[in-house]
Image (tube, grey):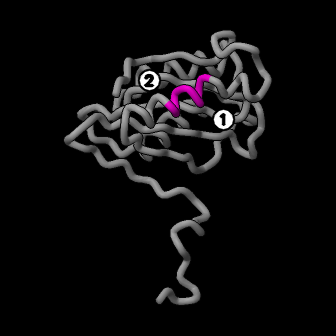
């Protein structure tokens, strides 16, 4: 029996974090990071260039495919041998971005959402979702037209 004041797992106010490596397949994480109060400032050339530079230098996790939307980012990442927790890596690149960007209106939500993908089918479904996000939001007619996307490292299932 559950006590009355004990929150159930689906009653969380914040997402649970922690990604564990597996021995029987790759560790690929689907990550979503939002701007504070969902203010649309992320999808522009300057932010895109700065994030790519930071992700290239922040080597604890390798960024694969990503899409920058006006108020959030979707990306796929895989850990390197450094064994840095995902939460630490996300905090690092968000703080590095804030330091380099120096625009007070460009701030991040405190948390992020991450999901470890468990199969190649799961990976392909999420990748298709990410690529078509600008089309669903009526920002472009074809996913290839969206300028604020790319792939920094090859991340394969």
Q: Quadrant of residue 29?
A: top left
Q: CA distance from mark 2 to mark 1?
A: 16 Å
Residue 137 highlighted magenta (yes or no): no
Report whether 97 appears left or right of 133: left
Report whether 69 appears left or right of 117: right
Residue at 38% over, 18% down: 154
Q: Which residue is mark 2?
A: 64
Task: Give the image location of residue 69, x and y in percent.
Answer: 68, 28
* Majority secondary structure in the magenta region: helix
Residue at 54% over, 56% down: 15
Out of 90 and 10, give the one closest to the viewer: 10
Q: Which residue is mark 1?
A: 72
Report whether 136 appears left or right of 91: right
Residue at 43% over, 20% down: 56
> Which of the two labelled residues, at mark 2 and mark 1, occupies the earlier sequence position?
2
> Helix, strand, or loop for circle 1?
strand
Task: Give the image location of residue 97, x and y in percent.
Answer: 57, 30
Task: Give the image location of residue 26, x and y in percent.
Answer: 29, 34
95 w.r.t. 64: above or below: below
């Amino acid at each position: 029996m559950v006590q009355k004041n004990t929150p159930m797992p689906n009653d969380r106010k914040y997402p649970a974090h922690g990604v564990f490596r597996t021995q029987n397949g790759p560790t690929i994480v689907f990550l979503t990071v939002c701007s504070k109060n969902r203010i649309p400032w992320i999808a522009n050339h300057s932010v895109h260039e700065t994030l790519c530079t930071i992700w290239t230098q922040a080597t604890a996790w390798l960024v694969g495919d990503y899409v920058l939307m006006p108020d959030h980012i979707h990306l796929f990442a895989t850990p390197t041998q450094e064994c840095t927790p995902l939460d630490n890596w996300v905090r690092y690149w968000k703080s590095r971005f804030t330091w380099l960007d120096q625009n007070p209106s460009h701030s991040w939500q405190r948390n992020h959402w991450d999901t470890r993908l468990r199969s190649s089918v799961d990976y392909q479904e999420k990748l298709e979702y990410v690529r078509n996000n600008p089309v669903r939001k009526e920002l472009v007619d074809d996913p290839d037209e969206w300028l604020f996307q790319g792939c920094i490292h090859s991340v394969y299932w």
